[in-house]
Image (tube, coloured by chain):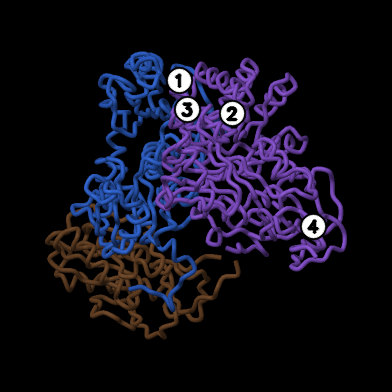
Chain colours: A purple, B brown, C blue
Amino acid sequence: MADLVIKGGTVLDKSGSRKADVAIGADGNISQIGTDIDGEREVDAAGCIVSSGLVDLNSDFCQPGNEEIETIESGTRSAVLGGYTAVMLMPHTSPAIHSAAAVKEMQSLRSEALCHIELSGSLTLDGLGDALSPIGEMASLGVRFFTHSNLASLDLSLLRRAMEYSSRFNVTIGLTPFVGGNGHMNEGNVSSDLGIRGVAIEEEEILTYQFVKMAKLTGARVHLQQVSSPKAIEIISGAKADGVSVTCEVSPHHFALTDEEVRSYRSVYKVAPPLRTGREVEAIKKLITSGQVDAIATSHTPNSLQEVDLPFEEAPYGVIGLETAFAVSVTELNLPLHEIMSAMSWVPAEIAGIEATHGGVLSEGRPGNLIVIEEDTKWSPSISQMASKSTNSPFDGHQLQGKIRHTFINGEAVVLHGETQR
Amino acid sequence: MAVQEDGTTPHIRGVFVARSEVMDSDDVRRALWRMAHEILEHNHGISNVALVGLQTGGVPLARKLAENLAEIEGSNIPVGYLDVAFYRDDIGLRPVSPREPTEIPFDLSDKTVVLVDDVLFTGRTIRAALDAVTDFGRPASVQLAVMVDRGHRELPIRPDFVGKNIPTRRDELVDVRENSVQIGEYKESNE
Amino acid sequence: MTSTKHVRGVDDLGKDSILEILELSNHFLEVSNRRIPKVPALRGKTVASLFFEDSTRTRLSFEKAAKRLSADVMNFSVSSSSVKKGESLRDTIETISSMGAEAIVVRHKSVGVPWMITEWTDASVVNAGDGAHEHPTQSLADCYTITRQFGSVEGKRIVIVGDIKHSRVARSNVKAFSALGAKVALVAPPTLLPSSVDNWPVDVIEDLDVAIKEADVLYLLRMQLERQKESLVPSLREYTNFYGLTLDRSQKLQKSSIIMHPGPMNRGVEITGDIPAFPNALITNQVGNGVIVRMAVLYHLLGSGVGLAGLHSEGEEDG
């Protein structure tokens, strides 16, 4: 008799789908996948999809330093409600994750997390783009990802040195093709009409080209974060064909919303890179459908309550997204669930280097990091009911399809029927 | 379908439907002639008298009275036109918009100002006109000439010169034209 | 998309309301010429003036307009208020609202603030300038100046010259002039034109000397000294050379044309010499018209009953 059985669902993983029950053993791993399994506890998955949990490559939980905005606990609570079993955190906390001590402190905070936390280190000290962080030291503590935030530019020579130096440590460098401070939104009809300084999409394309060219030169492995330009994705695909070790991610807000939203003047539409035009959004969706985008990531960026009511030009960039990413993807993308799970679970698990425990093919012995999905359920997110402490969700009140019913972390039911269990 | 020109803000969308004519063109003509004589008698002539017609109903009447006075006395009398919209006491309670410009091209200080309006009803328009007039100067005195006094005063205002006293029900309407005075009511327009 | 309750942008008004306000302005022109240029129309109403950006001219213009309507005025300027101490915009608006303002006139350096504010108050919101976005009462005043001169704005050729990209006056004017049927042309250095100006209902003319010949109205924008520092133009001298109204250029204007400027002028840059004193330069008229038109705007919002549409009395109210 198994400890726990997820009963009556359709199991979906990298290898395909089949109707099966999934049994979890006392050790938290999958003990059996088959038909008609009985268990001491049974969780109903009839009519649902059972799959590996989602993996996010880009979130900010503000701890340490800004716990009033979000914490590891509130952030991971948000994550598991959204179907995430693992989240990679960005290093711009306070202090930044740019030292062995900071890495150790973050690792100790894992005890407060409801799901697995993976760390990204800062490529440069304080993310300022002036000097390299102790990449080797942090890598030896298990950090496999180093990112540079978009708040300061990174000159080409330092970028090259960072890539060359880190190539010895088998890490991935995450780069965002955007430099903050040049503009608040997409340069186009809307920015011209509103008199708001805009950033031309060409700037993202130029930065993307710089990054992949430099990666080719140095042999580094890079991951392009927050890509919003279709041409930039084409540049990345070209680089892949050219043998560059490069992957890319797109966020749901970049394929669901356009710069026309800014006509509402609401800062909940201020993101970096900015929301683009309808034509570009349609093109991005097609590129996702054709498999040229490796991963969908949320870039979950909470803001403080004071910042909520700031005028658009004064507001910080960023929106939260862990609780809505899956549903927005199902609703907006003309993609079978298998492809969506590829972009949200097994590929990001590989990019983050955690495919041994997340994503992958579901089989006996694999850790029970699973979700149960109601693919057709329609629902409407509400910020007052979100677990995140922050309220900057651009999908508040939207009609979405695709709901997470249950989330399991190492075999433990952390979310049952849409409610967290601890 | 024309909207009633009642000399006040058109706040009801509707059409004036007449039910009875209380003065015909001869009645109106005679009344204006008599009133001109009364003004002259009361003021011992027209020196220092000025007419101010209230927009919009009082304007044609003021002109006609000025013509009559000029014919009788042989000299012209200053005539001004006043829109009292900005002095009304119901601004903010109902739509109030000025209709025709105010033109008072003379100094009314020390003059005898005769306000001219078509219908005297609650007295509120005249109260507003008195406030407006004192903003333009300090007249020696202010008198009031109306074609119709229909009763239902809400303020202590009384006319000096009246064309005709016509008792009415509160919900009735009085329409003063160049050649007739009619009583009727508003019918909601079908537009 | 029009709003009867607010004047945040030209689109809140639409063509019909713009014409109504211009018509109302004629009445306030007459009031302003009286011995006592004041009417009791908005007695008992409070107009709060909230200027986050310094501007004596516009603030005083609104104040004068409100006082001529006998309204009470509450002035909040940033330097003295708690806003500087970190009180949020929302808190400030809610405080002002709770003090009983029926109208809030707001100027702010950030785009969109007047629209945000309407979520936090029941008062009517009047935009006195939000970033580079809109300045609708300036546009109304400019439409009035043009109407007084030519009888109407319709069919007039209006050439706007200068830093269009950063100008809220330009954005509002393009909307207002187009709504009233004028033919609008823009002349500016390429760096000072908005990126998507091709989608605006305007002609873009490269050469001021060409544009000036056909213009009924030559509308000059202020050229900020900072633009040179940002390398948007190489120097102010070069700007004046190619885009300034010099004495030579002013000879090319038609006899019947007028010169306008929203002020304050940078003499010697966008306009030189004695041109502001020429009879066809209506720059000072614009200031007086500004007060008159703001009276019309405040009356339109708080007195003329636009928000009361549908209300009617029990009977005829007259005499």
Q: Residues within 10 Å of mark 4 (few under 14, many from 20)?
A: many
| Residue drawn at (49%, 23%) of the image | A154
Q: Are marks 1 and 3 in contact (CB under 8 Å)?
A: no
- Badge 3 sits on which subunit? A
Q: Are marks 4 and 1 in contact (CB under 8 Å)?
A: no
The residue that label 2 is drawn on is A173
Q: Are the numbered discs 2 and 4 placed on the same chain, yes or no?
A: yes
The residue that label 3 is drawn on is A133
The residue that label 1 is drawn on is C189
For the residues labelled 4 and 1, the Cα–Cα distance comes to 68 Å
**Front of the two marks 2 and 4:** 4
Q: Give the image location of residue B29, x and y in percent.
A: 36, 71
| Residue drawn at (45%, 79%) of the image | B183
Three-letter code for the amino acid on which mark 2 is drawn = Ile
Q: Residues within 10 Å of mark 1 (few under 14, many from 20)?
A: some
Three-letter code for the amino acid on which mark 4 is drawn = Val
Mark carried by residue A322 = none
The residue that label 4 is drawn on is A22
Three-letter code for the amino acid on which mark 1 is drawn = Pro
